């Protein structure tokens, strides 16, 4: 399905990023797994389809680290043709006046600016090749404020506009950019959210959370040409028509 493609996945230590890396490799792509710690990236790469993944250290909040990771990936396996911008954080959680200003800025830097930096780094080679796909992990928080998440909501709202900008600026040159909201998924971030107890999402029991498997499968679908008509849109995994197209089971009736 993705034979010949080279996918770079950020923030892939665990959760959706790790699941997406494994699914992309299973679909035939060569995968560059990135995390802030090399050991974490290499551990996930070792769990991917044999010989199809490489682990690299990359802190997306550091512009030079982003450029270095893309240079190294290109030298080792080739220029990325697919980018999954998954890295980000929900911290700091708290009412705006109670949060630390530096932590608030760090969220914007990692979740929004880091994603734009990674897109900037991979775009030249994608354009030279004649196309590529960029999947930005979005959220319902991009479009609806949630108590205690001012930094996260602002970062995801900004990332949604980056997706639209990518589609506007590069769509005619073969770049397919998507915002992808994976729903409320059982990840490490949700552990932090439940511990806060600050808003309705934090009060959901763990058994109500979705598995990482469906978002990973959906990301693979978005990386294929079959999803081209969705470029520039914010795609929500809970949309019935999208689930059917991506080969996901229907959700239970509410």
Image: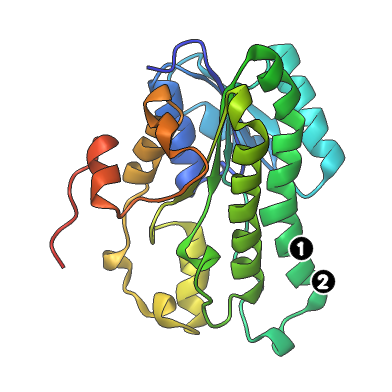
Residue at the outermost top position = 4
Crowding around mark 2 (Cα neighbors within 10 Å: few <14, some 14 to 19, many 20+) is: few
Along the line of sight, the residue nearer the viewer: 21 or 217: 217
- Could you say whether the residue bearing mark 1 is in a helix, strand or loop? helix
- Could you say whether the residue bearing mark 2 is in a helix, strand or loop? helix
Along the line of sight, the residue nearer the viewer: 89 or 133: 133
Q: CA distance from mark 1 to mark 2?
A: 6 Å
Residue 151, how many percent across, how many down? Answer: 66, 71
**Left or right: residue 183 compared with residue 116:** left
Q: In the image, what residue occupies the spot 43% across and 77% down?
A: 202
Snapshot quadrant of residue 186: bottom left
Q: In the image, what residue occupies the spot 46% across and 29% down?
A: 223
Residue at mark 2: 102
Does residue 42 appear anywhere in the picture?
yes
Q: In the image, what residue occupies the spot 60% across and 27% down?
A: 172
Indicate the quadrant containing the C terminus: top left, top right, bottom left or bottom right: bottom left
């Amino acid at each position: 399905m993705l034979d010949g493609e080279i996918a770079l996945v950020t923030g892939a230590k665990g959760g959706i990023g790790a699941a997406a890396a494994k699914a992309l490799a299973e679909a035939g792509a060569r995968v560059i797994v990135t995390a802030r710690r090399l050991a974490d990236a290499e551990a996930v790469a070792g769990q991917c389809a044999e010989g199809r993944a490489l682990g690299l250290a990359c802190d997306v909040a550091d512009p030079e680290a982003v450029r270095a990771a893309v240079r190294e990936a290109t030298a080792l396996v080739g220029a990325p043709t697919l980018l999954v911008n998954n890295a980000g954080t929900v911290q700091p959680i708290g009412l705006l006046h109670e949060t630390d200003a530096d932590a608030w800025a760090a969220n914007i830097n990692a979740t929004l600016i880091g994603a734009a930096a990674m897109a900037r780094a991979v775009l030249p080679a994608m354009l030279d090749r004649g196309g590529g796909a960029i999947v930005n992990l979005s959220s319902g928080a991009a479009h609806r404020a949630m108590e205690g998440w001012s930094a996260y909501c602002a970062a995801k709202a900004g990332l949604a506009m980056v997706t639209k900008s990518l589609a506007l600026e590069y769509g005619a040159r073969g770049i397919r950019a998507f915002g992808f909201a994976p729903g409320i998924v059982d990840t490490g971030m949700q552990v932090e959210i439940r511990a806060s107890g600050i808003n309705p999402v934090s009060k959901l029991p763990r058994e109500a959370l979705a598995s990482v498997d469906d978002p990973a499968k959906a990301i693979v679908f978005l990386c294929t040409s079959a999803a081209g008509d969705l470029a520039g849109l914010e795609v929500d995994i809970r949309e019935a028509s999208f689930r059917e197209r991506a080969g996901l089971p229907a959700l239970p009736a509410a």
